[in-house]
Amino acid sequence: MNLHRLLEARAAQGRPVRVALIGAGKFGSMYLSQARRTPGLQIFAVADLAPDRARASLARTGWEAERYAAKSLDDAVKNGTTCVTDDAMRAIAHPAAEVVIDATGHPAAGIAHALACCREKKHIVMVNVEADALAGPLLARRAAEAGIVYSLAYGDQPALICELVDWARTIGFRVVAAGKGTKYLPSYHASTPKTVWGHYGFTEEMVAKGDFNAQMFNSFLDGTKSGIEMAAVANATGLTPSPTGLAFPPCGVDDLPRVLRPAVAGGSLHHAGQVEVVSSVERDGRPVFRDLRWGVYVTFAAESEYVRRCFQEYGIVADPSGEYAAMYKPSHLIGLELGVSVASAALRREATGAATGWRGDCVATAKRALKAGEMLDGEGGYTVWGKLMPAADSSAARALPIGLAHHVKLKRDIAEGRTVSWDDVEYDAGSEAVKVRREMEGMFGREGVMRAKIIETQMNAD
């Protein structure tokens, strides 16, 4: 617990950790609100395609105008201020940049920024989990080869899940499941930006007054964001998805050890060592008691009578057998917590979660019957939602990742509920994002098939 001390040391040395933030939307704004109060840290650049929006975010989060009035990046470094720019690549390449944050939410942009950080030898914190789900295993490997840190973003649920998994394993527990909570009903998979606000209970007046993006909010509701985030967690932790994807079992915090245990032990899991998301509502719409909608969890096994007794003696909630227990964090602070990743990368050279292999994928799945010639509109849109799938199955099906299912035209009809494949769409094989993704599939696909066979063998043995 020494990150704050290390930051104070950098402040005393007059050598702050200099950060370039790319993307001044909601997540970036939340980080800015805390960064201005963090010792030993300087946001020397805020890059956004709409600089005026970035300035508005700085003002809204409490920054005095003179603190972000630098005319150039060099001026910002010299005077300890911030330069607002629309040139992200120049900010990455600047010699003063130590840590780069991609908070754009755009998969192709995230890939481009990560590769630039590898070239320029700058640590990167990937708030952009969409890019990580699309090509994180390859990006993390490229970063390791470049000698930089590639990290998931603390405060976002995937990094917090990784932390819980690491905690459990570090103290000797076998992790049975890990994931997060959300609001889910099966009908939500068909939700569109036009219907989303009714599911959230937002009135037209509330939407008009707020800073709401219907397609983004819909991606949380229709299951896409859960699929993306659990793909990132699987790739970072070694846990794997069920062959049928996420089941979203209704579950409150007191029932985590009972529900998130293998089916052979009376639970809902396909196998031990699984990622799963729990729903905050029952299938009939009733609220779950003590739900985990905003939180994260890990379940783990005792594997000894002594540990089972310890669970009981210290009030650890366990399943009826006493074998399975859980720990959870009831909420997350999103961008307000991002400073942990920045400090960890710069001062410890350690990621707060990063892909170590390709185990999970989030693939485009038809929301309705689609016709040849239609244009897919990606995450949270009207045409497809993102379903979690084991990477080996995705590779075998030549599944189209949800991160590349935007502005691509269908070549043939697709039935409702069917996975869209590369062969079903016209895509630009020359784009950087497509090339990186296809390279990752070739590099990691065989490893995923081998892992799937090992898991199947272990399950048959059990």
Image (cartoon, rainbow, N blue to C red):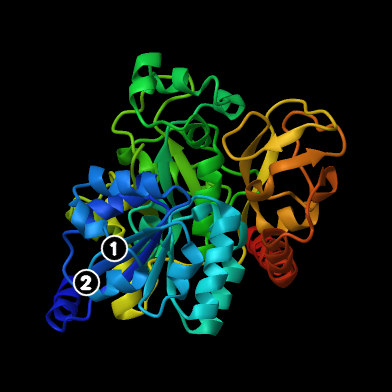
Residue in front for this viewpoint, 260 or 217:
217
Residue placed farthest to the front in the image?
A: 71
Residue 269, position as x, y percentages in the image: 53, 46
125, above or below 322, in the image: below
What residue is shown at x 62% (from left), y 41% (from top)? 386
Residue 158, position as x, y percentages in the image: 43, 55
Tell me which numbered mark, 1 or 2, is placed earlier along the sequence. 1
What residue is shown at x 40% (from left), y 50% (from top)? 51
User: Are discs 1 and 2 less than 8 Å apart at CB?
Assistant: yes
Tag 2 secondary structure: helix
Q: Amino acid at mark 1?
A: Ala
Q: Amino acid at mark 2?
A: Asn
Distance of label 1 from label 2 (alpha carbons)? 8 Å
Q: Is residue 350 left or right of residue 117?
A: left
What residue is shown at x 35% (from left), y 51% (from top)? 28
Q: Is residue 57 left or right of residue 281?
A: left
333, above or below 366, in the image: below
Q: Work out which quarter of the rendered image holds the C terminus and state it.
A: bottom right
Residue placed farthest to the left in the image?
A: 12
Tag 1 secondary structure: loop
Q: Residues within 10 Å of mark 2 (few under 14, many from 20)?
A: few
Give the residue at mark 1: 70
Q: Quadrant of residue 380?
A: top right
Q: Residues within 10 Å of mark 1 (few under 14, many from 20)?
A: many
What mark, if any, has residue 79 been given in the picture?
2
Residue 429, position as x, y percentages in the image: 79, 58
Q: Is residue 140 left or right of residue 259?
A: right
Residue 211, position as x, y percentages in the image: 37, 32
Count of marks placed on residues: 2
Residue placed farthest to the right in the image?
A: 412
